[in-house]
Amino acid sequence: MGKVIAIANQKGGVGKTTTAVNVAASMAATKRKVLLIDLDPQGNATMGSGVDKYDDPNTCYELLIEEKPIQEVVIKETSGKYDLIAANTDVTAAEIKLMEVFAREVRLRNALAPVRNYYDFIFIDCPPSLNQLTVNAMAAADSVLVPMQCEYYALEGLTALMDTIKKLASVVNPELTIEGVLRTMYDPRNRLANDVSEQLKRHFGEQVYRTVIPRNVRLAEAPSFGTPAMYYDRSSTGSKAYLALAGEILRRSKKESVAKVS
Ligand SMILES: Nc1ncnc2c1ncn2[C@@H]1O[C@H](COP(=O)(O)OP(=O)(O)O)[C@@H](O)[C@H]1O
Ligand SMILES: [Mg+2]
């Protein structure tokens, strides 16, 4: 059974999309079948996957509002060797229309049901707010991956975010777990970043990934070429870090499945 991981943090600019695109590509490079769902009307994950959001592709709008079958909405040709459900400004309309439809919180969960066993991993790139789209992601996901920058107040923000996720989960998805907390844009020369990182490990323990994503200009450049970093500069510290993250997610998933069986 595939695993659905929502990549969420209501703060913008923390590395959600960069993580979504690069972890999807890294996981696909390990020969897993991967689907990336872009739920952000900004369509950055779409562009970063080499799909032109201005080219009127099928998007989450068709999936969630028109209820087109997922097989018709999925885009197979991406630069990252994963499948994609795209987003563009149409998805803003989807967010508004979701308010009026029946079973609005579980639209995405229901839409994914036919392909949940086909994919090994489904990653969802969430918008930077706690709107109906994010609620749909939380309802559809098995777990949440939280990217964060090690800045002042990061810990407070994270504690608040975890509380929100728990509250939301208790309503729409009691099985939802925290997949992990990912330190992004990390600069080891920055003392504050090191302090915050230590506090984070103390508070959240094993939930914090060992893998740290460094600040790396290649990660910021790759999207303008419409490609994940590993196909832009394979030897960059950024692309290596996301490959390591994919490995860590795989190891954790194996441990969990052993735990579930026994
Ligand atoms: N590890 C990193 N090193 C350098 N730049 C990064 C890194 N991660 C993200 N960025 C850049 O920071 C900006 C915000 O990242 P993004 O992934 O779009 O965040 P979000 O999706 O949370 O808004 C983007 O311009 C992105 O290219
Ligand atoms: Mg984003």
Image (cartoon, rainbow, N blue to C red):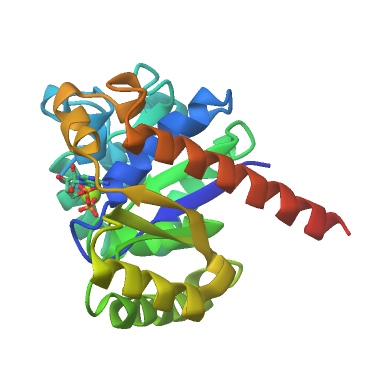
Which quadrant holds residue 99?
bottom left
Q: Quadrant of the C terminus?
A: bottom right
Which quadrant holds residue 145?
bottom left
Q: Quadrant of the N terminus?
A: top right
Q: Nearer the viewer, residue 113 or 30?
A: 30
Q: Is residue 224 left or right of residue 121?
A: left
Q: Is residue 239 above or below residue 128?
A: above
Q: Residue at x 57, y 47 (%)?
A: 249
In the displayed orientation, state which residue is furthest to the right.
262
Q: Residue at x 23, y 31 (%)?
A: 48
Q: Is residue 64 above or below residue 164?
A: above
Q: Residue at x 39, y 47 (%)?
A: 124
Residue 248: x %, y % from top left: 57, 46
Q: Is residue 105 visible?
A: yes
Residue 79: x %, y % from top left: 32, 19
Q: Is residue 139 left or right of residue 96?
A: right
Q: Is residue 31 above or below residue 126?
A: above
Q: Nearer the viewer, residue 187 or 170?
A: 187
Which quadrant holds residue 97?
bottom left
Q: Nearer the viewer, residue 134 or 9?
A: 9
Q: Nearer the viewer, residue 36 or 252?
A: 252
Q: Is residue 87 visible?
A: no
Residue 92: x %, y % from top left: 16, 51
